[in-house]
Image (cartoon, helix red, strand yellow):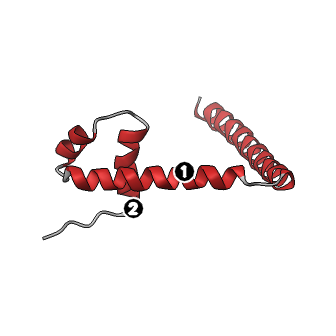
Amino acid sequence: MRKQYDQEYKEYVAKLIVEEGRKQTGVAYELEIATSTVGRWVKNYREKMEQSKNSESNLTPSEVEKLMKKHQREVEKLREENEILKKAMHIFKQNQE
């Protein structure tokens, strides 16, 4: 019977090899997966990373600016949420004392 793995798991295993520099044979042995299967996952992961790298480099300056503004808004929103949580934590901490 053949095991089915979801895409997230396949990418996790491929990242262990590509980004953390682990040996393909060692990871395959640890996880009890065929080395050829892990090799195919790594190949697909590398292709996917190459495609995303190429697609990002084809952005126009206005698209880059829009992305930067979007990310800046997200960062600002997260900072605000973080400040609110810090204040709430401080209030709860005072109430416990």
Question: Looking at the rendering, in which quadrant would you find the N terminus?
Answer: bottom left
- Residue 25 x, y percent position in the rendering: 22, 41
Location of residue 22 by image quarter: top left
In the rendered structure, which amino acid carries the disc numbered 1?
A: Glu
- Residue 88 x, y percent position in the rendering: 68, 41
Instruction: Name the residue beneath numbered marker 2.
Output: 7
- Image height check: is 54 above or below 2? above
Q: Residue at x 72, y 37 (%)?
A: 87
Instruction: Name the residue beneath numbered marker 1.
Output: 50
Badge 2 density bin: few <14, some 14–19, many ≥20, Cα 10 Å: few
Q: In the rendered view, does 4 fall on the left or right side of 79? A: left
Residue most toward the left? 1
Q: In the rendered view, does 48 fall on the left or right side of 9? A: right
In the rendered structure, which amino acid carries the disc numbered 2?
A: Gln
Q: Residue at x 58, y 34 (%)?
A: 96
Nearer to us in this view, 79 or 44:
44
